Image (cartoon, rainbow, N blue to C red):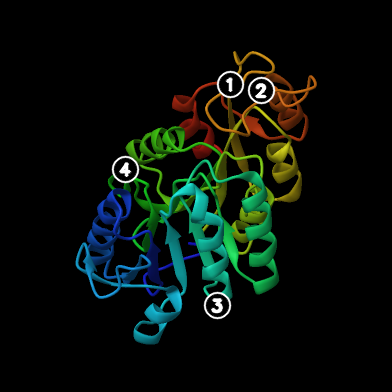
Amino acid sequence: MILAGRETGVIVTGATGRQGLFHIQLMNEYAREVGGVGVVAGVTPGKGGKEAAGVPVYDSIRAALKEHDADASVIFVPAGAAGDSIMESAANGLSLVVAITEHIPVHDTMQALAYARLCGSTVIGPNCPGLLSPGEAKLGIMPAQLATPGPVGVVSRSGTLTYEIVDELTRAGIGQSTVVGIGGDPVIGSTFTDILARFEKDPATKAVVLVGEVGGALEQEGAASTTLPLVAYVAGVSAPPDKRMGHAGAIVEGGEGDARSKIRALEAMGVTVASRPSEIPALVRSLV
């Protein structure tokens, strides 16, 4: 496992909104199932003293930390205020910030990520499903019932495609150490390279599935940074140039970042690349 475990206390910001309420309940159901700490408090300015899905709500992270021990935050704050919420988490010493929110203005994201780095906080996202260490912790919106503990890490720019691949692995009897959705925005807090470096240091992770999509070169940079056995899948082989495909960062611009060129580059590095998700379990099994 990387980033979070059973002992990780979590604060959810945007706790009283529909998404916050729903996912606090799911995160704490999983925490109870695995014997973890889970979500200890919620934050919504002006709603201090209330409860959200059974956890106390405070007006600020500082106020919550006076009453509870926490190491991480999960952010469901609306896009216009999410950058400030990332910075509030970092300023109050939370070592991990998982930003689920999408459509955060790019300038807000850049400012928040720069500040978080200065504070020594790791940011996952924004515009991501979070992370799941099966049997340990769930921070975000990943469906935990699809996963099972094991030796294979998964790191992905996609959300729902990640769930499909985790399900394929589990059905094939291949468990996962940690599943991380890094987010699909052009500017994100943790790249493939960052997460693969953590998997390198994790004795439980023996191989990694890297799930990419069109746009940029994060997949190639990540593959070049690690010595771990990799199986890659790149979505978007049929994506037309100059058209955004789902994520803000999933666009082929200037003739670069298309799926086929990424696949060729990964294969040239010696990375095994699947042509469809259903191929991934057999390819992983050949490596571990």
- Image position, residue 253 (x, y; %): 74, 23
Residue occupied by mark 3: 93
User: Observer-nearest residue: 194 or 127?
Assistant: 127
Q: Are marks 2 and 1 in contact (CB under 8 Å)?
A: yes
Q: Residue at x 67, y 66 (%)?
A: 115
Q: Are marks 3 and 4 in contact (CB under 8 Å)?
A: no
Q: Residue at x 61, y 60 (%)?
A: 198
The amino acid beneath tag 3 is Gly
Q: Earlier in the sequence, mark 3 or mark 4?
A: 3
Q: Residue at x 71, y 50 (%)?
A: 226
Q: Residue furthest front?
A: 46
**The quarter of the displayed image where residue 113 is located:** bottom right
Q: Mark 2 falls on what kind of element?
A: helix
Q: CA distance from mark 3 to mark 4?
A: 32 Å
Of discs 2 and 4, which sits in the foreground?
Answer: 2
Q: CA distance from mark 2 to mark 1?
A: 6 Å
- Image position, residue 244 (x, y; %): 60, 23
Q: CA distance from mark 1 to mark 3?
A: 39 Å
